Image: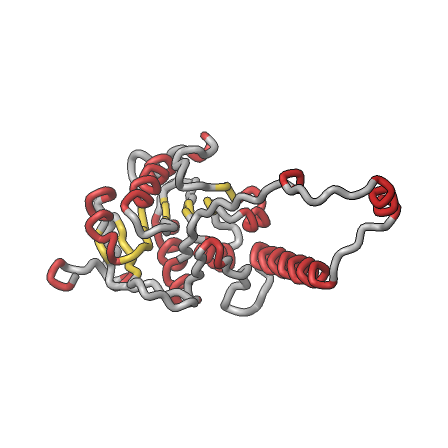
Amino acid sequence: MDLEEQYNESSPHLSEFTGPSVPNNAKEADDDDPLTLSPYALEALKEFLTEQHSAAAAVAETAASGASSSEVSLISEDWRLSQFWYTPETAETVSEEVLELLNCLTTDYRSVACIACPTLFAYLKKANPYVCARLLEYDKRFEQYGSDFTFYDYNQPEELPQALKNAYQIVVADPPYLSLECLEKVSQTIAFLARPDKFYLLLLTGEVQRESAAKLLGLHPCGFRPQHSSKLGNEFWLFTNYDPGNRLGGWQSEDRV
């Protein structure tokens, strides 16, 4: 999913490591030697810098929306964050639905918030570079999107700029975990972002969240099934708080669920 598990890495400082004592004269000699890296370390550094450069270039290309291909260049999935990008077909289908909803709005200011779904955000910008969309995302590599990016940690569901409060007529969310605890916190974020009078909500998550999505957010499942480029074992569903009619496969009746 754009599933992305939050993780905490604890890297000890170099000062925490101690080694055998070295004679003073040896230390002085070492101080005169230039700092060198082992061939292994140099190769690792080279791979890291290459990956970072490629990631930045891909995001910049997408943000500029200059590619002629119908697909969008995305930075690589980070296995440490359990990231899974949508297939082009899924991203295009959902982005077309969002653009359709934006066109139906009668207000002058039309905006959409994308919670933890960078693939959708990228395809929205590809389809319409001028769309007012914001990506709320934990992965700071997406800071390449500039002012359209807001750092988001679902563990602090309302730790967001006040300017975003009740500012969005459309909210699309793809919670990073398939757990009730995560969905509850993302629901808090949705309430923070959404317009209090009326808003459209699309939720992409596992089928296992069906009852929780209905209870917490009043959502109904659609016939459309999101797919990911990396094949996942969990079946993913799309839920909405509005009747999409014939789009997105329509609402599923209870006897079909």
Q: Is residue 133 visible?
A: no
Horizontal side, residue 145 vs residue 83: left or right: right
Residue found at x 40% / y 39%: 155
Specify how the rendered protein is coloured.
Answer: secondary structure
In this view, 157 is above or below 242: above
Residue drawn at x 30%, y 64% as measured from the top left:
225
Percent x, y for residue 95? 41, 58
Residue at 86% x, 49% y is 33
Q: Is residue 131 visible?
A: yes
Residue 76, image x and y in percent?
54, 61
In this view of the protein, which residue sits in the foreground, 197 or 113? 113
Of residue 243 and residue 182, the one placed in the foreground of this image is 182
**Residue 52 occupies quadrant:** bottom right
Quarter of the image containing the C terminus? bottom left
> In which image quadrant can residue 246 be found?
bottom left
- Corner quadrant of residue 182: top left
Q: Residue furthest left?
A: 255
Q: Is residue 254 left or right of residue 125?
A: left
Q: In the picture, which quadrant includes the N terminus?
A: bottom left
Q: Residue at x 31, y 45 (%)?
A: 183
The x and y percentages for residue 210 are 22, 53
| Percent x, y of residue 165 | 41, 33
Closer to us: 41 or 135? 41
Residue 183, placed above or below residue 71: above
Q: Is residue 194 above or below residue 145?
A: above
